[in-house]
Amino acid sequence: MSVTTDSKATPLPETTPDQNASASPSWTIYAWVGTVPLIWGFNFVCLKIVYEVGFTVPAMLSVRYILMALALGLLLLFEKDRSIAREDWKYLIVFALITVALYQYLFAKAIELTSAAESALLISTSPIWVFLISMVMKLEAFDRTRMIGVLVGFVGVGMVILGSGASPTVPETHHIGNLVMIASAILWAAYAIFSKPLLAKYSPMKIVAYIHILGAIILIPVGFGQMMEVNWATLGVVPWLSLLQYSVLAGVYGFIMWYRGVQKIGASQTMLFQYFVPPVALIASYLILKEIPTVLQVIGIVITLGGVHLARQRSNGPSAPAQAAKQSS
């Protein structure tokens, strides 16, 4: 999918990925970004494990963001320039509130309410939402092939949701959880689109640190009381490892690499790696949580990923709105 941010939709100057990198990005950036879905695929299993030992969503997020804020704060000290221009703070704060504080809660809540496999599939529809949001904002022109991909993707999602009714391992609340995860997927798509103006001016490390520290200001107090009620003395090794994986590996390393990908190769190409999250999550949930997908769900996953692939296909040349915006910038 081509996500073009050469537009006057935001007050910040925008660039194409190649303005911050060479014309042909090194294969190493693809390799580093490729490690992210392997880590994020385990998020769904790790959260399920954490919930099973008594953590609520607010308590888990409070723990996660205490660890993340400490780690990101330390990493931020190594940045040569830690400043943010005064005119960018309003954009940064709103961005953090919506795509960090709100997104993180919805994502974690959805996993509590539905299965790990369904969660992973639905969040991976983000490229579809990237295209739809971009088209509504006139950052992308209407494209018949990509719209077919959107429709095919939704058919696949429908098959996964309907097929879950025959699975004994799916929670009764999964329909609500699926709707919440769809909302999360839309916010994750917005994450990729609206981070681009910031990444045109600042390093991925700086943006990840600031937006998640700002998000922590909200998320830590909300769940702090419930976090203190957790019986930490009896918390086993596996729950601890799950918290560390979700906080440090997925939260710090994962976001830094993801934003670096958005900066270097663009939101479109970075979102492509989201394809690998559902298979990793599906295998992990089967082996660890014993979640058993139905045949209809497996078929639906294949159809959904096929639709996502069509929805992100690049048209020949830039879209008309994007080209007009580029010429006027």
Image (cartoon, rainbow, N blue to C red):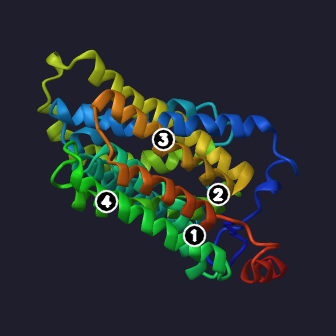
The quadrant holding residue 25 is top right
Residue that badge 3 annotates:
279
Q: Which residue is drawn at 59% across and 45% down?
A: 258
Please identify the residue farthest to the right as the structure is shown: 23
> Marks 1/4: CA distance?
18 Å
> Marks 1/3: CA distance?
20 Å
Q: In this view, does 312 lie above or below 322?
A: above
Residue that badge 1 annotates:
149
Task: Identify the mark nearer the N-term, 1 or 3.
Answer: 1
Towards the viewer: 67 or 266: 266
Q: Is residue 294 above or below residue 87?
A: above
Q: In which quarter of the image is the C terminus?
A: bottom right
Q: Which residue is drawn at 60% across and 79% down?
A: 135
The reply to whether discs 3 and 2 touch (Cβ–Cβ < 8 Å) is: no
User: In the drawing, does residue 316 fall left or right of residue 171?
Assistant: right
User: In the drawing, does residue 310 fall left or right of residue 296?
Assistant: right
Q: Label 2 neighbourhood size at 10 Å, few (<14), some (14-19), many (20+)?
A: many
Q: Label 4 neighbourhood size at 10 Å, few (<14), some (14-19), many (20+)?
A: some
Residue kind at label 2, given as amino acid type: Ala
Task: Identify the mark nearer the N-term, 4 or 3.
Answer: 4
Q: Quadrant of the N terminus?
A: bottom right
> Marks 4/3: CA distance?
17 Å
Q: Label 3 neighbourhood size at 10 Å, few (<14), some (14-19), many (20+)?
A: some
Residue kind at label 3, given as amino acid type: Pro
Towards the viewer: 25 or 14: 25
Residue kind at label 1, given as amino acid type: Gly
Number of the label disc, if any, that sits on residue 21? none
Task: Identify the mark nearer the N-term, 4 or 2.
Answer: 4
Residue 139 appears in the picture as rendered: no
Q: Which residue is drawn at 29% across and 20% down?
A: 238
Residue that badge 2 annotates:
267
Residue that badge 4 annotates:
161
